[in-house]
């Protein structure tokens, strides 16, 4: 992309702020009520913050960290940093002091903004091994600074807005260009230390333009609900696009409150990961399973009608009079109520982070929700492909984004080239070199294929392919996705490498399981006793049999162990993006795994 600054996020944001001065830009919850921040108020706060950063000696391309949950001040710090040509370095809000310290030191971070008390305390612990960290700014007023010299509250940091820094501020604004880095995002690898992905303003500008071409138009009448962590490139990129389009962005600090927020906010847009959609799907199907026969019949008839109707409409085909009448009835009885689960106003639902199960994608499409399965990675500034209007393909991860080149390389690896691709890994030229082919394509590490119509499909993660002792290859993520959509399954880790057959560690969805146990009057003292109960084991055996019946025998989970506790980041079993750290899990659950192979008939 040339040095046309039209799509530079700072240029575009300041233009939007002039145009929509008193319109709401951000929405957040305070004292159980939703409050708005206007565009003019936002720009006033971020300008004050930009000048405060300059007063604290932040130079061009210095690194500023954010260690917090989603909140308006997260975005304020991000934009204030970018306005003075510095670089934002996000840290997941659940990271430990040790994990935070690695990022602070590796990124050469100068100032760190934190959210709540726990994050501040972890940051203070981390700071003991971070000699270059100059200040920890606390974004919540009720946080105790512990008399630490590094700590300062938000309002004290901003002070009176440092008007004497205005000339320096304008100089930075005028010097902005697309070659500057806008962020360093540390990818939470499943092995080894995370690597700092360098993304430039040119990368972000490329994606803003590409999304304009790929998605239906968005505007200031749209409302987006932001509940995925802003520390991840997916939500951060989406919020940047909301700013770009003038959409009202709603912040949900606690993602566990998403169902209530959907009813309160009634968003028209929301991006989520497959697990969210799978949970909605399994909850609906669970209720249908327990419904009377006639209601089940109406439900399945409505889905049959809905799919035919939306498929014809998606493909631009004529809707017959009879189908239109059937759909009106199906929508009144069933489909509109299902859309109501998501607030009733949703226009677009992007889905990324992992492959969405085809049945789940088809369900949301059928009930009239415009779900957009996609694919991407941090190194490609979030989005490589997404579903398009008029081309619903439930098995696909969409079409490559505009101005993005995708080809299939050795071992069927998906390779990417274009303005979306990172500048490299920070201070790691060897890893940078290893991540590109000789002709300059980014290696994604994912295997897949393109069909004749340009639809992209993902088959497995190359590095995670498992080979059984009988020589059969297993794609664990595909199997985990299939089983994980069951309403009784919360997490699953497939075991197969160098084993004679496939097994799995399964963390049940205890909400569903405890309800089931109550219905059957199963008595138990604790979750350990529950997961060992014969009737519970039998339930999972039956459900696994049903979920896997279409798979070849060698791919099926033959043995499983139910675990009483979830895999957690605290135990280093999963990454902040919820990917399994298989090596850690194999070591921690060695006894349970060995038992599954010792006792097989």
Image (tube, rainbow, N blue to C red):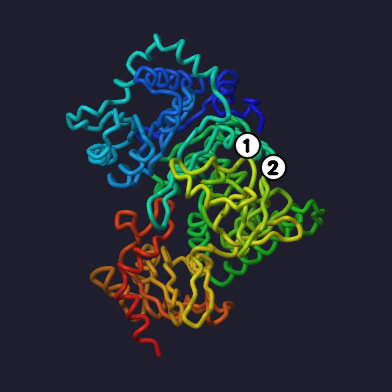
Which of these two is toward me, 161 or 166? 166
Q: Residue 520 at what x, y percent from top left?
A: 36, 75
Relative to the observer, which residue lies in front, 341 or 565? 565
Which label is found at residue 403?
Answer: 2
User: Mark 1 and mark 2: span between their CA atoms?
Assistant: 8 Å
Left or right of 154 in this view: 306:
right
* Residue tagged 1: 206
Compare residues 362 and 376 and report the one nearer the observer: 376
Q: Position of residue 38 (x, y in %)?
A: 49, 23
SS for callout 1: helix
In this picture, residue 208 sits left or right of residue 426: right
Marks 2 and 1: in contact by CB < 8 Å? Answer: yes
Which residue occupies 28% across, 26% down?
153
Q: x, y (%) of residue 535?
A: 36, 80
As helix, strand or loop, the secondary structure at mark 2 comes to loop
Which residue is outermost to the bottom? 601
Q: Position of residue 75 (x, y in %)?
A: 45, 32
Q: Quick one: label 1 or label 2, which is nearer the N terminus?
A: 1
Quarter assignment of residue 23: top right
Q: Quadrant of residue 179?
A: top right
């Amino acid at each position: 992309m040339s040095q046309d600054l039209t799509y530079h996020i700072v240029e575009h944001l300041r233009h939007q702020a002039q145009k929509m001065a008193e319109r709401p830009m951000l929405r957040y919850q305070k004292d159980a009520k939703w409050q708005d921040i206007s565009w003019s108020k936002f720009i006033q706060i971020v300008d004050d913050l930009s000048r405060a950063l300059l007063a604290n000696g932040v130079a061009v391309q210095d690194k500023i960290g954010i260690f917090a949950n989603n909140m308006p001040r997260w975005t304020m710090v991000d934009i204030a940093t970018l306005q003075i040509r510095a670089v934002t370095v996000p840290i997941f809000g659940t990271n430990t002091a040790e994990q935070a310290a690695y990022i602070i030191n590796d990124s050469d971070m100068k100032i760190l903004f934190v959210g709540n008390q726990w994050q501040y305390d972890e940051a203070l612990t981390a700071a003991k091994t971070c000699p270059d960290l100059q200040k920890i700014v606390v974004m919540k007023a009720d946080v105790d600074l512990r008399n630490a010299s590094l700590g300062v509250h938000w309002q004290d940091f901003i002070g009176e807005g440092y008007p004497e820094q205005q000339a320096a501020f304008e100089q930075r604004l005028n010097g902005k260009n697309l070659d500057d880095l806008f962020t360093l995002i540390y990818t939470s690898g499943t092995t080894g230390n995370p690597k700092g992905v360098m993304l430039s303003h040119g990368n972000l500008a490329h994606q803003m333009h590409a999304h304009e071409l790929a998605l239906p138009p968005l505007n200031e009448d749209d409302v987006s609900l932001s509940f995925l962590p802003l520390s991840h490139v997916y939500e951060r990129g989406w919020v940047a696009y909301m700013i770009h389009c003038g959409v009202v962005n709603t912040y949900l600090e606690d993602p566990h409150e998403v169902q209530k927020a959907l009813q309160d906010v009634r968003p028209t847009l929301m991006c989520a990961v497959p697990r969210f959609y799978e949970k909605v799907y399994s909850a609906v199907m669970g209720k249908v399973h327990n419904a009377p026969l006639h209601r089940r019949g109406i439900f399945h008839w409505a889905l049959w009608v809905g799919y035919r109707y939306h498929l014809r409409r998606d493909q631009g085909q004529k809707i017959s009079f009879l189908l239109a009448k059937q759909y009106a009835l199906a929508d009144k009885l069933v489909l509109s109520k299902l859309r109501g689960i998501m607030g009733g106003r949703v226009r677009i639902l992007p889905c990324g982070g992992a492959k969405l199960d085809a049945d789940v994608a088809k369900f949301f499409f059928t009930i009239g929700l415009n779900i957009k399965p996609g694919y991407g990675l941090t190194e490609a500034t979030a989005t490589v492909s997404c579903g398009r209007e008029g081309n619903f393909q439930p098995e696909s991860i969409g079409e490559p984004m505009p101005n993005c080149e995708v080809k299939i390389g050795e071992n069927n690896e998906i390779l990417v080239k274009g303005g979306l691709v990172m500048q490299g890994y920070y201070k790691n030229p060897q890893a940078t070199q290893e991540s590109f082919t000789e002709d300059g394509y980014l290696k994604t590490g994912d295997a897949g294929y393109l069909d004749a119509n340009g639809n992209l499909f993902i088959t497995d993660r190359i590095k995670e392919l498992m080979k059984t002792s009988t020589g059969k290859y297993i794609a664990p993520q595909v199997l985990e996705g299939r089983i994980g959509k069951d309403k009784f399954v919360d997490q699953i880790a497939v075991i197969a490498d160098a084993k004679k057959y496939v097994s799995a560690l399964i963390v049940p969805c205890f909400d569903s399981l405890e309800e089931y146990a109550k219905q059957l009057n199963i008595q138990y003292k604790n979750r350990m006793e529950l997961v060992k109960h014969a009737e519970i084991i039998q339930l999972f055996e039956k459900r696994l049999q049903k979920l896997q019946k279409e798979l070849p025998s060698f791919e099926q989970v033959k043995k499983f162990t139910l675990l009483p506790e979830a895999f957690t980041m605290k135990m280093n079993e999963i990454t902040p993006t919820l990917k399994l750290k298989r090596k850690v899990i194999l070591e921690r659950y060695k006894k349970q795994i060995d038992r599954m192979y010792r006792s097989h008939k």
